Image: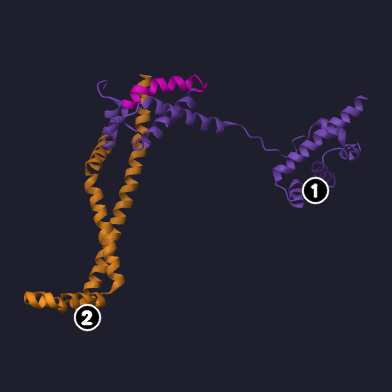
Chain colours: A purple, B orange
């Protein structure tokens, strides 16, 4: 197994001899696995990434230059797989209408917030006013012709600004 | 031992991927070749039938005549042949023939690769 160069192995795989791919796997799987497991604490996820990397490498085998060393190319694929993994596993929290429905918001309910709304930016003021009038976020999005997530963000920021002002006044 | 098991899992996934890909390509290519061949045969037969009904093939009897006569009239005969030839079936027939030929050339060119691949795949699934 050691006598065959990477170039010879790639050439054989390109000739349809798929079993030669095990040489590539045997040569590099330990190094790749070590690299990934040092960056991912979950062993199963690390193994999945290593497996997907070798599969992606196999799929790309017709396109690679056999004269160039295999390992750097393989590592590029591994890094891309890890990037995709991290992107997928990032938790994107959807802003929802009840996000700030906690006890702190309760203190605003009995207070006339109209005067606090006056000093916040106009788009936040408009959105927050419509909320106090009883419109749902979806209805506000349609009224103001803005995307729903934008409305959620505006309302959230508006509420934060109002809360800040209210607490500032309370301390005084 | 754990490392061997891990490597075997990778190998298994590779063979699974390659088997699906090869089967898919095989079905698509065979289907396409059959379609092209049938199309070519259908239009070819239709073409010959129409030419026979029109007695266009009788024009080619000129080429059995003396050299002098052939020399004098061959252009006229070919012009007439061209005018009487049903164009669309002829074009389709030629197109099907060319595509079929390309498929055959592709198969011949990649025969070794295809054979090796099939051997690898069959050997793997029969021994694992």
* Residue displayed at 22% across by 44% down: B111
* In the image, residue B125 lies in the stretch drawn in magenta: no
Disc 2 residue crowd, few under 14, some 14–19, many 20+, Cα 10 Å: few
* In the image, residue A28 lies in the stretch drawn in magenta: yes
Q: Residue furthest right?
A: A172
The residue carrying mark 1 is A135
Q: Nearer the viewer, residue B71 or A46?
A: B71
Label 2 or label 1, whichever lies nearer to me, is 2
Q: Is residue A46 above or below residue A152?
A: above
Q: Nearer the viewer, residue B118 or A63?
A: A63
Q: Is residue B19 above or below residue A24?
A: below
Can residue B128 be seen from the camera position used here? no
* Residue displayed at 30% across by 48% down: B26
Q: Which image quarter: residue A111?
A: top right
Magenta part of the protein: which range? A23-42
Image check: B121 left or right of A148?
left
Q: Position of residue B81 (x, y in %)?
A: 21, 76
The residue carrying mark 2 is B54
Q: Residue furthest left?
A: B66
The quarter of the rendered structure image containing the C terminus of chain B is top left
Disc 1 element: loop
Q: Which image quarter: residue B88?
A: bottom left
Q: Position of residue B44 (x, y in %)?
A: 24, 68
Chain letter belonging to callout 1: A
Q: Residue furthest bottom?
A: B54
Q: Which image quarter: residue B123?
A: top left
Disc 2 element: loop
Image check: B21 left or right of B90?
right
* Residue displayed at 23% across by 70% down: B45
Q: Report the label total.
A: 2
Q: Position of residue B125 (x, y in %)?
A: 29, 36
């Amino acid at each position: 197994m050691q006598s065959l160069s990477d170039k010879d192995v790639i050439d054989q795989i390109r000739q349809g001899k798929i079993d030669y791919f095990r040489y590539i796997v045997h040569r590099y799987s330990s190094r790749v696995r070590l690299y990934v497991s040092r960056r991912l604490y979950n062993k199963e996820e690390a193994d999945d990434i290593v497996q997907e990397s070798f599969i992606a490498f196999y799929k790309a085998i017709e396109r690679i230059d056999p004269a160039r060393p295999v390992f750097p190319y393989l590592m590029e694929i591994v890094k891309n797989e890890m990037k995709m993994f991290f992107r997928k596993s990032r938790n994107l929290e959807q802003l929802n209408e009840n996000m700030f429905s906690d006890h702190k918001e309760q203190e605003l309910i009995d207070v006339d917030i109209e005067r606090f709304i006056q000093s916040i930016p106009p788009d936040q003021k408009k959105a927050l006013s419509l909320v106090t009038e009883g419109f749902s976020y979806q209805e506000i999005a349609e009224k103001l012709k803005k995307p729903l997530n934008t409305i959620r963000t505006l309302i959230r920021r508006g509420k934060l600004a109002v809360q800040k002002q209210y607490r500032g006044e309370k301390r005084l | 031992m754990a490392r061997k098991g891990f490597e075997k899992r990778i190998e298994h996934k590779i063979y699974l991927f390659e088997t699906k890909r090869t089967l898919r390509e095989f079905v698509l290519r065979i289907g396409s070749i059959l379609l092209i061949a049938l199309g070519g045969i259908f239009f070819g037969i239709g073409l010959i039938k129409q030419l026979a009904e029109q007695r266009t093939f009788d024009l080619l009897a000129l080429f059995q005549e003396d050299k002098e006569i052939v020399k004098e009239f061959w252009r006229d005969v070919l012009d007439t042949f061209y005018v009487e030839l049903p164009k669309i079936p002829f074009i389709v027939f030629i197109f099907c023939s060319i595509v079929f030929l390309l498929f055959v050339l592709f198969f011949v060119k990649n025969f070794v690769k295809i054979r090796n691949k099939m051997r690898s795949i069959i050997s793997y699934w029969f021994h694992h």
